[in-house]
Amino acid sequence: MIGVFPAESSLRWMKVQLYSGATRHSLAAVEGMDRSPQRLVVAASKDEVFRSDQTMGFTAADDEWDVRADDLRWAGYPHSTLTCSRPEIRISANARDAFAWISLPRTLTYWTAFGTMGVESEWGNAEGSALIEHAWGRDSRFNVARTMPRRWHWDVLRFDDGSTCAGLSLFGVAAARSGGRTPGTRFSKGLGLRVRVLDRDAGGISSRWKGRLHLRSGSVTYEARAATPVSHEIPGGGFLGFEFEGSCAGRAVSGTGFTEVRAR
C-alpha cells in the first residue's frame, strides 16, 4: 500500500510492504523482496525518512482480503483499513481503478489499484492518493532479480486535483506500462514512461528529471525535482518523493509524486 500526499502535508509519501517469503526464489522478486519473509513500513517528510523493517511473514484469508502480521492487520478491498501498533499507523483507503502490469497465470501477476487514502501515524497525518498493489510469483530456482534491467524508473504522479497516474520506464529498452487518471479524464492505460535524467545526487540517484507519461486519454510531460531524502531500499537506487510541473492536453499541471528508481 502506497500513499502520495500534497506538498503541505507533514508526510510526503508512505509505503507498507509485506512479503510472504520463498523457499528458493520468488518470481515476484521483480517487486524487490526475495527469500526471507519481511514487513516493511517506510515514510518520508520533506526532511526525514522514517523506517521500520522486521523479518516476519503473514497470514491471509482464502475467501476475503484479510492479512495479518503480528500487530498489523490489513482488511478489506477495495475499501481497506490497515492498522499497526509498532510503528503506530492507521490507514483508510479506497482504491477501485485497477490494471495489471503483468499477468502470466500460475507464473507471475502484478497489479495496481488507484484511489484515495487517509493516514494517521506517529510520524504525522495526511490525506492523499492511494495505490494498493499485489505481486505474486511462483517459487523457483531461477533468481529473476539477476535478469532485471540495471536501470529503471517508476513514477507516481499525484496532480493538485487529486487524480493520480503511474508509469514505468526501463532505461535502454522501450517504455513499459502506465495507467491512471489525469485531471478531468477517466481512468485509462498507456504505453509507459520515458525519462531523461537532468541531475543526480552524490549517490547517483536522480534528483531532477524530465518525463513523458503516456495514457490513452492523453500524455503528461513534466519536469520533476526530488523533494524528500532517498530511502535506499533498492540496490543501486531507492524510494523518494518529488514535486513536478508540466502540461497535459494543453493545460498546465503540477503536483507531487513518488518514485522507485534503480540508477545503476
Image (cartoon, helix red, strand yellow):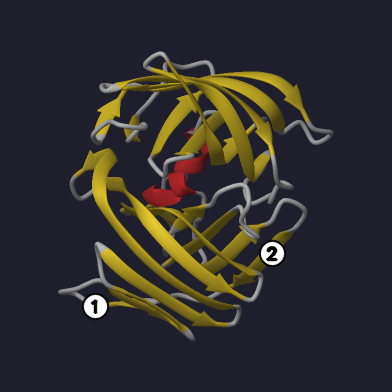
In this view, which residue lies farthest toward the left?
63
Quadrant of the rendering where the C terminus is positioned: top right
What residue would you read off at disc 2?
50
Q: Is residue 131 above or below residue 119?
A: above
**Which amino acid does the dot numbered 2 rest on?**
Phe
Q: Is residue 14 above or below residue 84?
A: above
Q: At x 42% / y 44%, what residue is drawn?
A: 162
Camera-side residue of 234 and 114: 114
In percent of width and height, residue 77 lies at 25, 65
**Which amino acid does the dot numbered 1 rest on?**
Ala
Camera-side residue of 84 and 173: 84
In the drawing, what numbered circle is on residue 15?
A: none
In the drawing, what numbered circle is on residue 61?
A: 1
Q: Are marks 2 and 1 in contact (CB under 8 Å)?
A: no
In percent of width and height, residue 100 lies at 26, 41
* Among the 4 quarters of the image, the one containing residue 203: top right
* Among the 4 quarters of the image, the one containing residue 205: top right
